Image: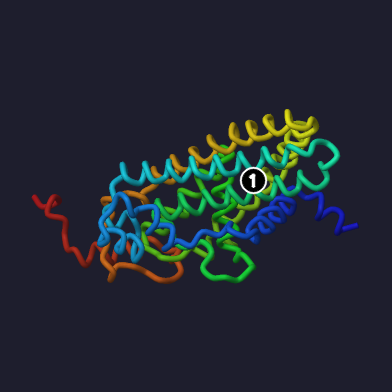
Amino acid sequence: MKQGKDVENPESRFFTVLLAAAKLPGVRVQREAYLRSALARHCSEDEIRRAVETTPAAAGITAEVLDKVANDSIRYETAKVSALSAAAGIPGILALPATVPADLAQYVGHMLRISQKLAYLYSWPELFSDEAEDVDDATKGVLTLFFGVMFGVQSANAAVGKVAGMMAEQVARRLPQKALTHGVVYPLVKRVAGYLGVRMTTQSFATTVSKAIPLLGAAVSGGLTFATYLPMAKRLKKHLAGLPLADPLRRVGEEDVVDGEVVEDHEVLVTQRAEQLGPDPAARG
């Protein structure tokens, strides 16, 4: 009986779809390869090298360049996911049991792809750090929050901003594991996952209806995907671009980068930096 309740739990349903999509071929985007390819036409080799070794913001890549590259990636992923959704709608109602789950998986897979691309452009670290099939809890948490931003969940916006603030303050190269797995952000991750589980059920129903008529269903399905995916990707881009983590003025040296967990006592770091810099000249007199 407990197992049945777990299956019906919207939070569990969402994580099941997310983890299944993360295992699909081509879903995981390698940070270095993507940044090198995406920035090649707009940046010098030295800028690209620094963007890969640190972050695009630390490398001084302008907001205008990042905006153009982000829009190119959004257009590419939107066209691809819409075409695949339309193709899934061609067989009509007889093939629904096979096409609907596959269509949902590829839709979520493309949400994962654009989430990674936008995250890397706007100075987030590698989300899938190795070739292992399993997704660690911190990555699962931040991807859940990214999806929440795409769906317009305000608490997800706040949580992503909090995580980005921790990373910007510490200049960290990894996600804050504690905050995302059992710290202050974790309850928000669970809440957003539950909301998305409910939304995905509704969206699956709409997709099923659109596929009921052969050929016409293909056009409707592809159009529905385009109409939902594009604004969601733009919403995530706008939010990530507006965070301090993405500010090109935040340039740091290699010695300033922390390759570890984000500490929870931020005031200690602020005090230490203030002591290193000495008294503020503006405060004299």
Q: Is residue 100 left or right of residue 47?
A: right
Give the image quarter of residue 220. Answer: top right
Q: Residue at x 55, y 40 (%)?
A: 79
Which sits in the foreground, 115 or 142?
115
Residue type, mark 1 in image: Tyr
Give coordinates of residue 265: x percent, y percent.
42, 63
Q: Return the x and y of residue 195 as percentages of the image width and height.
A: 67, 43
Query: Which residue extends farthest right?
Result: 1
| Residue 188 seen in the current view | no
For the residue pair 267 and 70, the one nearer the viewer reads as 70
**Farthest residue toward the left?**
285
Q: Which residue is mark 1?
A: 107
In the figure, 20 relative to 225: above or below?
Answer: below
Which x, y percent locates residue 155? 56, 43
Q: Residue at x 12, y 54 (%)?
A: 281
Q: Quadrant of the N terminus?
A: bottom right
Secondary structure at badge 1 equals: helix
Q: Residue at x 43, y 62 (%)?
A: 33
Q: Eyeballing the image, is 90 above or below 177? A: above
Q: Using the rendered image of the protein, determine whether residue 275 is visible from the camera's viewpoint.
A: yes
The image shows a total of numbered marks equal to: 1
Q: Nearer the viewer, residue 5 or 254?
A: 254
Other-residue count near label 1 (Cα within 10 Å), few / some / many at <14 / 14–19 / ≥20 = many
- Residue 100: x percent and y percent? 76, 44
